[in-house]
């Protein structure tokens, strides 16, 4: 997550990098930009589901320019 990162995608999201791939994935699971291999996208979506509360909590912090907490893989 990036601080105040609300102007381009307008919704809570994370930035994901895997090898040469990168993607922006909404916390609702929507692919907003980029691409990932199918297997890695499934892993990201599963992780978002498992960590949903933590991710939304960190999103609010990041938008307010506060340091987000670390989230376990």
Image: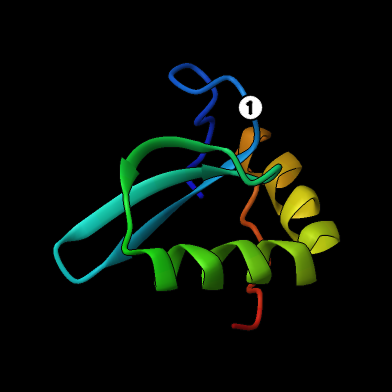
Q: Residue at x 75, y 40 (%)?
A: 60
Q: Is residue 5 left or right of residue 22?
A: right
In the rendering, at what x and y percent does residue 35 appear? 31, 48
Q: Which image quarter is the C terminus in?
A: bottom right
Is residue 64 shown to the viewer in this render? yes
Q: Residue furthest bottom?
A: 73
Q: Nearer the viewer, residue 23 or 55?
A: 23
The percent position of residue 20, horizontal first and vertical second, equals: 14, 63
In this view, 22 is above or below 32? below
Furthest residue in direction left, as rendered: 20
Which residue is labeled 1 in the image?
11
Q: Which residue lies most toward the right here? A: 53
Between 41 and 54, the residue placed more toward the observer is 41
* Count of marks placed on residues: 1
Apparent side of residue 3 relative to residue 27 in the rendered image (left or right): left
Identify the residue at image location x=40%, y=58%.
16
- Direction from residue 35 to residue 14 in the image, left or right: right
Q: Position of residue 69 (x, y in %)?
A: 68, 67
Residue 49 lies in quadrant: bottom right
Q: Quadrant of residue 68?
A: bottom right
Q: Is residue 51 visible?
A: no
Crowd class of label 1 (few under 14; some 14 to 19; many from 20; radius 10 Å): some
Say above or below: 52 vs 65. below
* Image spot of residue 41 (x, y percent): 46, 62
Look at 79% across and 59% down and name the residue there. 52
Q: Secondary structure at mark 1?
A: loop
Which colour assignment does the render follow?
rainbow
Which residue does the image show at 54% across and 24% down from the upper left? Answer: 6
């Amino acid at each position: 997550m990036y601080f105040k990162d609300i102007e381009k995608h307008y919704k809570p999201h994370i930035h994901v990098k895997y090898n040469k791939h990168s993607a922006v994935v909404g916390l609702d699971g929507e692919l907003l930009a980029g691409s990932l291999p199918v297997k890695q996208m499934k892993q990201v979506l599963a992780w978002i589901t498992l960590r949903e509360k933590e991710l939304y909590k960190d999103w609010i912090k990041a938008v307010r320019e506060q340091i987000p907490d670390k989230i376990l893989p």
